[in-house]
Image (cartoon, helix red, strand yellow):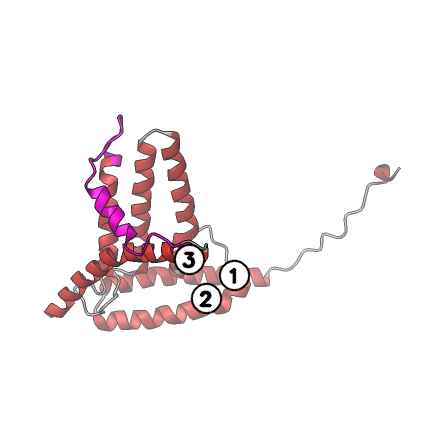
């Protein structure tokens, strides 16, 4: 692996760390302009970060390790995701070490750590914040990648989605072929697992299309109810 790959990984992490507050500031600025306000500026999140870093850390009484380790775990998962996702180059030392399911899992790990930190405070506001965080995660994170939904045992596929499942299967087979050529053994194992779940979903959806419809008839009132 050339030095360019290592430089690309470091550059990706720097871009994410430096760009995330700017993106938040840009979103806030656009919202302010849409509401007819001047806005605090794109650099406001960086100003807030600098101010917070100069404040004294406060730990609520009675909190345990979950509250103290959650910030570090949240930052660590975000940095690992920034290093894994090929933002600047695909030829990096981490290429083939993980897939999007791993990315979703890392994001979920950081979310769970943040929710546990809120619950660890033992306050009503902490519980409300944790509940909100998990609700948003349950709605947003499974949609980041269709393979995460395919692995869900509670998901029942509509027979109308069979063409879409065929497209996903074709894409997975192409990715598996490339992973074998590149000797990405972890990626091959993950794709094989996804193909197993995918074919089970296809068989279940095909079985639903062959199930005969049952005519229950039109409900009629009983004779005594008409009197």
As helix, strand or loop, the secondary structure at mark 2 comes to: helix
Q: Position of residue 101 (x, y in %)?
A: 32, 57
Which quarter of the rendered picture does the C terminus lie within? Answer: top right
Could you tell me if the residues under marks 3 and 1 are in contact, i.e. CB atoms within 8 Å?
A: no
- Residue 165: give its label: 2
Q: Which residues are magenta?
A: 38-67
Q: Is residue 46 above or below residue 209?
A: above
Residue in the picture at 19% in, 59% down: 14
Q: Judge by depth and name the residue closer to the eye, 179 or 56.
A: 56
Residue in the picture at 22% in, 49% down: 76
Query: Mark 1, residues whose alpha carbon is within 10 Å: few (<14), some, or many (≥20)?
Result: some
Horizontal side of residue 202 vs 29, given as left or right? right
Q: Position of residue 176 (x, y in %)?
A: 31, 69
Farthest residue to the right: give it: 227
Horizontal side of residue 146 vs 76, given as left or right? right
Residue in the picture at 29% in, 57% down: 22
> What residue is disc 3 on?
33
Which comes before the other along the chain, label 3 or label 1? 3
- Residue 7: give its label: none
Q: Position of residue 195 (x, y in %)?
A: 37, 63
- Residue 205: give its label: 1
Q: CA distance from mark 1 to mark 2?
A: 10 Å
């Amino acid at each position: 692996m050339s030095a360019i790959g290592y430089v690309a990984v470091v550059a990706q992490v720097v871009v994410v760390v430096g760009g995330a507050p700017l993106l938040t500031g840009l979103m806030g600025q656009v919202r302010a302009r849409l509401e007819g306000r001047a806005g605090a500026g794109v650099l406001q999140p960086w100003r807030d970060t600098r101010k917070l870093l100069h404040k004294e850390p406060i730990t609520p009484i009675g909190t345990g390790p979950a509250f103290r380790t959650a910030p570090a775990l949240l930052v660590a998962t975000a940095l690992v995701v920034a290093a894994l996702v090929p933002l600047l180059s695909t030829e990096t030392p981490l290429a083939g070490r993980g897939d999007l399911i791993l990315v979703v899992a890392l994001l979920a790990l950081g979310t769970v750590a943040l929710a546990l930190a809120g619950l660890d405070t033992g306050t009503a506001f902490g519980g409300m914040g944790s509940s909100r965080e998990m609700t948003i995660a349950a709605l947003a994170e499974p949609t980041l990648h269709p393979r995460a939904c395919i692995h869900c045992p509670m998901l029942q596929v509509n027979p109308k989605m069979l063409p879409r499942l065929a497209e996903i299967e074709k894409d997975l087979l192409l990715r598996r072929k490339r992973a074998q050529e590149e000797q990405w053994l972890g990626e091959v194992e993950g794709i094989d697992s996804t193909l197993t779940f995918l074919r089970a979903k296809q068989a279940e959806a095909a079985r639903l299309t062959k199930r005969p419809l049952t005519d229950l008839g039109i409900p009629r009132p009983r004779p005594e109810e008409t009197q």
